[in-house]
Amino acid sequence: MTPHLQIEDVSVTYGAVRALNRLSIHAAKGETVALIGPNGAGKSSLLLAIAGVVPLRSGAVRLEGRDLAGQEPEQRVGLGISLVPETRDVFKKLSTHENLLIGASRRRLTRAQMQADADRIYALFPRLAERHNHMAGFLSGGEQQMLAIGRALMAEPGLLMLDEPSLGLAPVVTDAVYAAIATLRDQGTTILLVEQNAARAFSVCDRAYLMQAGQVIEEGSAETLSARGSVESVLFGRSAPAKELRP
Amino acid sequence: MPDQQNPLRDMAAWLWPWAVWAVLLLVLTLIFSQISPAMARITTDTLIRLVIVTGLYIFVGNSGILSFGHGAFLIVAAYASAWVTIPVAMKGVILPGLPEMLRGIQISPLGGLVAGVVLAAVLGLLAGIPLMRLSGIAASIATFAFFIVISVIYNNWTDWTKGTASLVGLPTWVGPWAALAAALTALLIAWAFQNSRAGLLLRASREDLVAAHGAGIRVMRLRLLAFVLSAAVAGAGGVLLGHNNGALTTANNVYLNLSFIVIAMLVVGGIRSMSGVVVGTLVLSVLAEIFRRFETGVDIGGVMLQIPGGTREVLLGLCMLLALILRPDGLSRGREIRVPGILRGTRPGAKTKKEEALP
Amino acid sequence: MTLLQMLIDAASVGGLYALTAIGIGLIFGVIGLVNFAYGEYIMVGAYVLLLSAGLYWPFAIGAVLVFVVLFALASDFLVFRQVRRAPPETLMIVSFGLSFMIQHIWVVMFGSLTKTVNFLPAINRSVEIAGLRIAGVSLLQIAATVVLTTVLALFIKYTRIGYQMRAVSENPRMARLVGVNSNWVIAVAFAISAVLAVTVTVLFVAQTGSMTPFFGVSLTMIGFVATVIGGMGSLPGCALGGFLVGAVTTILQMVLPPHLQPFREAFVFTSVILMLLVRPQGLIAVRSAWERV
């Protein structure tokens, strides 16, 4: 069976800097996959490459077996790939409701259908319903994160990519965001989750990849990875004591 | 061990990029001015344009702000020089409206040049004070408005300028050698400014305005300084222009078209380097000359090839657009001529080796 | 009575300038392009009117509309799309080069001398309202300004493409990431700005009856200046700036002695530059403008 998402030998470079080095991963339909790794491991670059924002130096991104080369970012949204970037980037001068509507740009919907879809997002994040008329720039960080996820969901993605959804959020808000992620997982959405907070990621994911310096260094279920202790060594550099000895 | 101090060599290293262009221009002038009188005229025109492009570059290249207004300095300087150098006998006939004080004098060509340059610099200062307060694009737009103001005034100020009619009688003292001297001086001024403390600070502020403010750089003053200097050099170009043609007019958008050509030269060559100024001016001048030949008709293998009049400007515009799309950093890519190793204080690569040697 | 007359004159001249400024401001707001070629949209339309003036007037206007919209779309597709990611300064020079090129293509085709056309002379007739004699074209200018700005404001506020336009304006990269076809949205913005240009063309030509390949330059300049006064990037600011320039022009027309009248444009622009000494950020400081510029 072809996996929902297949990344084959992908390399990405920014000038002389190599962000991804012949990296391969995959995700089955309905699977929640976490990408764990330190800053600069290339996690965000990978998501941007899948979304089509960053060009590939080599390799291929396949969605249900189909090579996405040459597909513009907005076309990939139409194919069912949505990215919630680390910076969230809600449209600050648009209202919450308009932000949601714009998420459905790729779908030909009537006003009623669009309203129904927006209502589903409001059911998922009741906080947004209270603020549907507010300018998104005036929302709190947590609300902006909910809005960014909701906006991505308006495109009805088969594959949802979340970049550090808990970054800078209060624990209570993080709980709400993760509850929503769990709901989406249970509804059968394939999720690619980038997270520094490995424990959080493990609480929802089926499988995880450990990344370092643009490559996958380990792969496995949440249980096996935490048991091996390799997460800690990668995230906190325990395996590289030489650095700490430098003057 | 650092090499010994050698002021002479340091000076030579400092001057090298300018000197290379100076020698090249000297050789080109030597060759082309001898071919034919027509060629000598083209050489002079090109060198005058080089002065103007250099003037524009002093502001644009260092501040990063585009100016569409430098045509104003050409106009002001050219007419100022005309007022003081046209023979008294002629002035009484051509410009009876000129005040007695100006009508009665006639000074040397050099005096006219100084008058033009000073007036351009003063105007640059007066206009620069409000203009330099604006940032980026708004500043560029305002420079264009400034150009229109000056151009409308000179167009309608018939007592002093004869408006769209021709003002004749300017002594034609400009030839290839005078133009060459002016071009080399202009380039040297540009080079000295961009390597001066003020020039370097201004370039730093171009890269990051907020950081420059944070570091206490008084960006507005530096911009104003560059603007005034640039106005003076462009003004010198304007004076040369008048004394090359022997006549001035504001008809048919001559200064608007000239402004365009000058901006195109700077952009095609590359806004960020002095080398770009020379390269852009030479390349577009050669192209313009070729297009001009085609407008008058060229015989290619027995077939007379002729393009309609006015096509030259269209083709030059096209060249500029293609350059911007295909090579946005210009032909020079913002680089200057490399100083050879002998003249540099340290051997090439020596610095990095030292760094590696550190524990 | 003269005061009222002056107000109407100011409103009608200002309306024309406001339409120009909005056309420029719309494109600047959406893609950060200061479009010198906007004046050429107005100019080429005038020449289409010159060629089609023999037709029944709605057809003539229709021909101008079709031609100018296609012309604007072509300028976006062939030129501006090629430099979409370039910094605003580069975009500005590109449009400057394009504007110069179009002007000289028109010089090659039509010559650089003034051409005249008698288009809809009827609208220059004066009508008398409450004891005031008002030129029909003034009323049309005021009406066109009011109608077009209202329609445009509603369009941007309430339609799907309207909020997509606002999204592209705020964050083009994110707009694409949520599936907005930004090239399409930008094309629509160009088409709208072309419609505004056509309105200006028709009113201007009907009023003056003359054109040269360069007459767009001073209108563009007025539009730019109005945009700068308005604060770069806010459409209400553009409209306000346009009316202000119109008012200054009208006042100068009344108070300047005849021998200074030819210098009117110089006075207008000087007063604007001086105003920027007091408020360099424009009348309405728009946050997005600071983010952009």
Image (tube, rainbow, N blue to C red):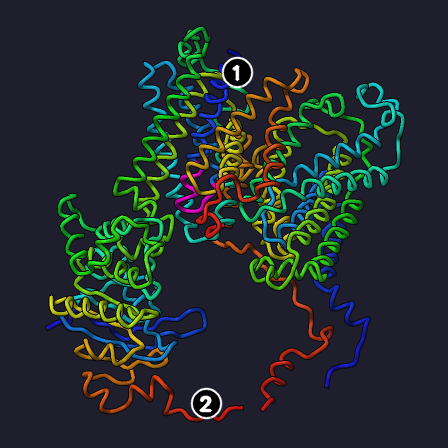
Q: Decide: is B247 above or below B241.
A: above
Q: Do labels 2 and 1 touch, CB within 8 Å?
A: no
Report the residue marked by disc 2: A243
Main secondary structure along the magenta-highlighted residues: helix
Considering the numbered disc 1 on the image, is that residue within a helix, a strand or a loop? helix
Report the residue marked by disc 1: C3
Considering the numbered disc 2 on the image, is that residue within a helix, a strand or a loop? helix
CA gap, disc 2 and disc 1: 80 Å
Towards the viewer: C178 or A187: A187
| The quadrant where residue B197 appears | bottom right
State the quadrant of the N terminus of chain A.
Answer: bottom left
Whether residue B36 is visible here, answered yes or no, is no
Instruction: Check if residue C198 falls in the magenta segment.
Output: no
Q: Position of residue C58 (x, y in %)?
A: 31, 18
| The quadrant where residue B337 appears | bottom right
Q: Decide: is B267 above or below B90.
A: below
| The quadrant where residue B214 appears | bottom right
Q: Amino acid at mark 1?
A: Leu
Other residues around mark 2 within 10 Å, as few (<14) / some (14–19) / many (≥20) = few
Residues in magenta? C24-34
